[in-house]
Image (tube, rainbow, N blue to C red):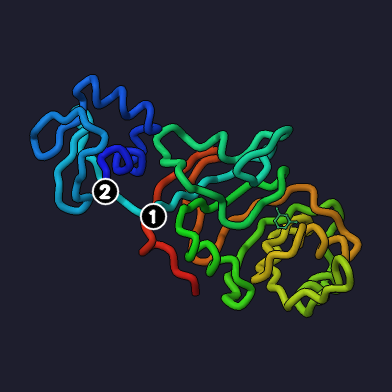
Amino acid sequence: MRLDKYLVECGVGSRSEIKQILLKKLIRVNGKITISSKEHVDEFKDEIYFMEKKMEYKEFRYYIMNKPSGYITATEDKKEKTVMEILPEWVVKKDLSPVGRLDKDTEGLLLFTNDGKLSHELLSPKKHVEKIYEVHLENEISNESIEKLESGVIILDGYLTKPAKVEKISDLVINLVISEGKFHQVKEMLKAVNNKVIYLKRIKFGNLELNGLKIGEVIEINKENINIK
Ligand code: URA
């Protein structure tokens, strides 16, 4: 692949930035300084350094964010602030998008990847990937409501939700386990049992957990860490 393409995919910068970096003689390929963006490199064999940093080529990248409230889950928007805008500088943004969506006021686990196939699988209704939400409620939850949530409730235009699992944490807090992702699903499910969500956080997506990741923090993970089932 061309050296400039390689460097873009390693997150060094845009093509025009890379042109400048090359002219400043900051790139070495197998020990030799190169200034040509057109040079061809073998991404798996060649040793490529940007200043003192050895480049590591990965076709697909995976990141987990603990999403803060106040940002919409979109790659761009004219009016609202998006989750893309709060990805740290070191994240390689090329072709990256969030997997699924969390509402603007929802916090918690959001996966980002440029691996379209995996993203599709994780979102496919056929895969039944479990999501766990910590749900804070306006009104105390009754046993009757828990039973209804666990057997399925009617939301939106008459859609009957699949049976969910409810873990009661306190009278006003539950963990809700669902394996579907309808629009505003958790809020709609709680509305269907005459309650209201006042705070929502996704704490688990498939096998992925926040593991102490602070609000707004992002970590890179490997594909091997993601189990669909
Ligand atoms: N369900 C909701 O209602 N909102 C979210 O952000 C995620 C699931």
Q: Earlier in the sequence, mark 1 or mark 2?
A: 2
Q: Quadrant of ligand 1?
A: bottom right
| Residue type marked 1 | Phe
Direction top: furthest residue: 24
Element class at badge 2: loop
Tag 2: Cα neighbours inside 10 Å, few (<14), some, or many (≥20)?
A: few
Position above or below: 107 against 120: above
Q: Give the residue pinned by disc 1.
A: 60
- Taking the spot 55% from the left edge, 65% from the top edge, the residue there is 120
Position above or below: 111 against 125: above
Q: Are marks 1 and 2 in contact (CB under 8 Å)?
A: no
Direction right: furthest residue: 194
| Residue type marked 2 | Met
- Taking the spot 52% from the left edge, 53% from the top edge, the residue there is 111
* x, y percent for residue 168: 71, 65
Mark 2, ligand 1, within 8 Å: the answer is: no
Q: Indicate which disc residue 1 carries.
A: 2
Give the Cα distance between marks 1 and 2: 16 Å
Q: Quadrant of residue 184?
A: bottom right
Camera-near label (1 vs 2) is 2
* x, y percent for residue 226: 43, 64
- Taking the spot 33% from the left edge, 42% from the top edge, the residue there is 5
Q: Indicate which disc residue 122 carries.
A: none
- Taking the spot 55% from the left edge, 45% from the top edge, the residue there is 66
